[in-house]
Image (spheres, rainbow, N blue to C red):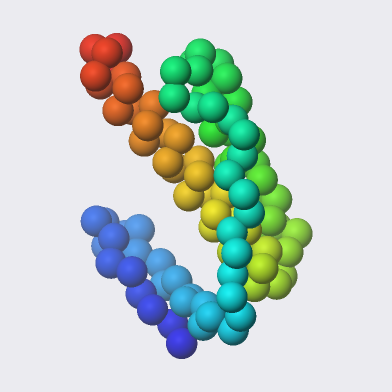
Amino acid sequence: MTNVIPLASPRAAHPVQAFAPSHTFKPAPASPVRVAGTPAIERQQAIENALSMALYHVRHGNTLEAMRTATAKAIRAASMLKQACTESAISGRG
């Protein structure tokens, strides 16, 4: 089954295949990286590491588990980036 997720820009629209849950998926435990209140360089390293790991799993894994791991890493990076943007806006650095 293929689901298309509508995006803001029609040019950016790309069909995304939805994976049917064939077994119970347990996400990897959250990384011990403390993001809130960390210095900017440590936060940047954590975000880049999560994105690098997501790309690694996309490039080197052809299994459902690899795609789920890649998705989890990408979501983790997006979450850390969103938190960094929020903290930046609150502190007036944005």
Query: In which quadrant is the C terminus drawn?
Result: top left
Q: Residue at horizontal 54%, vertical 27%? A: 34
Residue 93 x %, y %: 29, 12
Query: Which picture quadrant has residue 91?
Result: top left
Direction from residue 49 to residue 61 in the image, left or right: right
Query: Is residue 58 positioned above or below 16 on the image?
Result: above
Residue 48 x %, y %: 59, 33
Residue 77 x %, y %: 50, 41
Residue that protrudes farthest toward the bottom in the picture: 1
Q: Nearer the viewer, residue 31 or 60?
A: 31
Query: Is residue 83 positioned above or below 57 on the image?
Result: above
Query: Which picture quadrant has residue 65?
Result: bottom right
Q: Residue at horizontal 35%, vertical 58%? A: 12
Q: Residue at horizontal 29%, vertical 60%? A: 7
Residue 45 x %, y %: 60, 26
Direction from residue 24 to residue 16 in the image, left or right: left
Residue that protrudes farthest toward the right in the picture: 60
Q: Nearer the viewer, residue 73 or 12?
A: 73
Q: Residue at horizontal 47%, vertical 77%? A: 18
Query: Is residue 83 positioned above or below 10 on the image?
Result: above
Direction from residue 24 to residue 10 in the image, left or right: left
Number of marks drawn: 0
Query: Which picture quadrant has residue 80?
Result: top left
